Image (cartoon, rainbow, N blue to C red):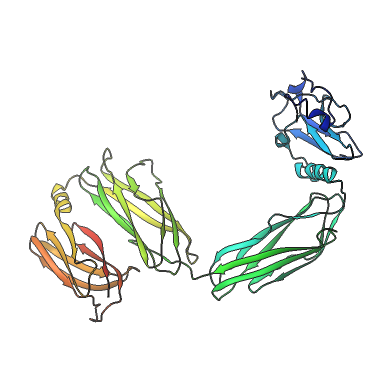
Amino acid sequence: MGTGDHALLRPYFGLGENSIPSPLYSEIQTIIADSTEIFPGYSLNYLYGSNADFGLDELEADSGTAFAQSQDDAVRGIYYNPRLYRTIASSSFFGAMADGSIGNTKAYVMGQYLNFLIDSTLPNIIASEFELDFGITYPDYTYTHQLVISNSGLDTLWITDINIAGEGFNYLGSTEFELANSEQQVLEIEFEIDELGQYFGELTIFSNDPDTPELLIPLSTECILPPAIHCNPFSIDITITSNHIHEGIMILSNIGESDLNCELAIMDSSQFAGWLEISLDSCIIQPNDYEDIFISFDPDGFEVGQYTAEIVIYHNDPSQDELIIPITMTLDYTNTEDDLILSTNMLIGNYPNPFNPETTISFSITQTSSLVTLEIFNLKGQKVKQLFSDQLPAGQHSIVWNGTDESNKSVASGIYFYKLKTENYEKTKRMVLLK
């Protein structure tokens, strides 16, 4: 409470009829405790220095007692104890104060405020959280959760013991320590287990807090099988022979047992930004599913040469770090014939899709090619079968896949990819086998 029309409230804060506009407010640099009985031993600096123009007024004490002043002796804080209640009035913004040394911090001052307001000097234990939920965890991985314990009482808080119960939960820190007023201690709680399921535990902190001699913190987590990321391809190297936009595709698959969360970003280390774009910057992929990431290459305005970048994929697969997909775009405008082939060769698709037990894959070739290959891959990027690898004349062609692998054994239901590749063309599409 400071400036403004608070006439009805002023008596409840021990203030006089008015808060006084102080001509010295722009010189406020320090707030100093002045009442050694209630608020001793602190001095806080004003964050904004001596030239801040925030219109902080000097307070006028009536029935209250001044306890905080600025360096120019202007009253900035008044406490009031009419025995029925207690109040604190201030004309300075507490958030605009800066911490001093240990024991001379905003937390320390706030502890003094609270102890005055609740009329207690006894130790008082405070935990940063009422419960610790580790969320989703995975087998055989160690997880750490921090719990901050502090003392808001004036008297010393003695922690006499710390116990932890519950399968998989563990605490390895000190079980006996003391905390002075406003001091803190960070407790690190661990969880690790090799079996799936929901787990519950309890952390018990014993202290000399008369109101809470045993502080109970519930613990919980759910352990599930992790996601597993797979990316196809692992790198992209494209040669472009015209200034038209070209597109590619990158397939992110989840071959794990829980949802895969991905965040994607382009890292272009060169000074030629803007030639590479991706269709998604985040996605959630369910188990045994995938997401197509379309990649656009825009060479317009760029000179002949080679340009490099990386697509970085941040994910929650605990078995590996972020994926880095190298991208290389080479511009070569000298071979327009190759560009014509690139733009007119076509992987048309497969029918039916979904299918059981076989499907027909159709594609067209504009000129006789020295080598045409058609291959089948699974979600992991493993080659299931090579359907064709030979020369083909120009024209439209069709090849049947009967859902078998290289050993002519039937494959399982699921998502598969077929890739057509020639000298100057490469394209991948997906299909679904349902049995």
Residue 265 percent coordinates (x, y): 42, 50
Q: Going by the image, does 145 lie left or right of 381?
A: right
Assign the C terminus to one quadrant of the image: bottom left
Residue 302 percent coordinates (x, y): 28, 40
Residue located 8% across and 60% down the image: 395
Assign the N terminus to one quadrant of the image: top right
Quarter-wise, where is residue 207 in the image?
bottom right
Q: Going by the image, does 360 lie left or right of 119?
A: left
The answer to whether residue 327 is visible is yes
Q: Nearer the viewer, residue 368 or 404?
A: 404
Quarter-wise, where is residue 358 in the image?
bottom left
| Rendered view: 248 above or below 430 | above
Residue 38 percent coordinates (x, y): 89, 40
The answer to whether residue 422 is visible is no
Residue located 65% across and 65% down the image: 219
| Rendered view: 173 above or below 39 | below
Residue 147 percent coordinates (x, y): 69, 58
Q: Nearer the viewer, residue 335 or 416?
A: 416
Q: Going by the image, does 407 lie left or right of 41?
A: left
Which residue, as the protein is rendered here, is positioned at the far top?
A: 23
Residue located 32% across and 44% down the image: 275
Residue located 17% across and 59% down the image: 348
Q: Nearer the viewer, residue 36 or 119?
A: 119
Which residue, as the protein is rendered here, is positioned at the far right?
A: 37
Q: How many numbered badges does the structure rendering display?
A: 0
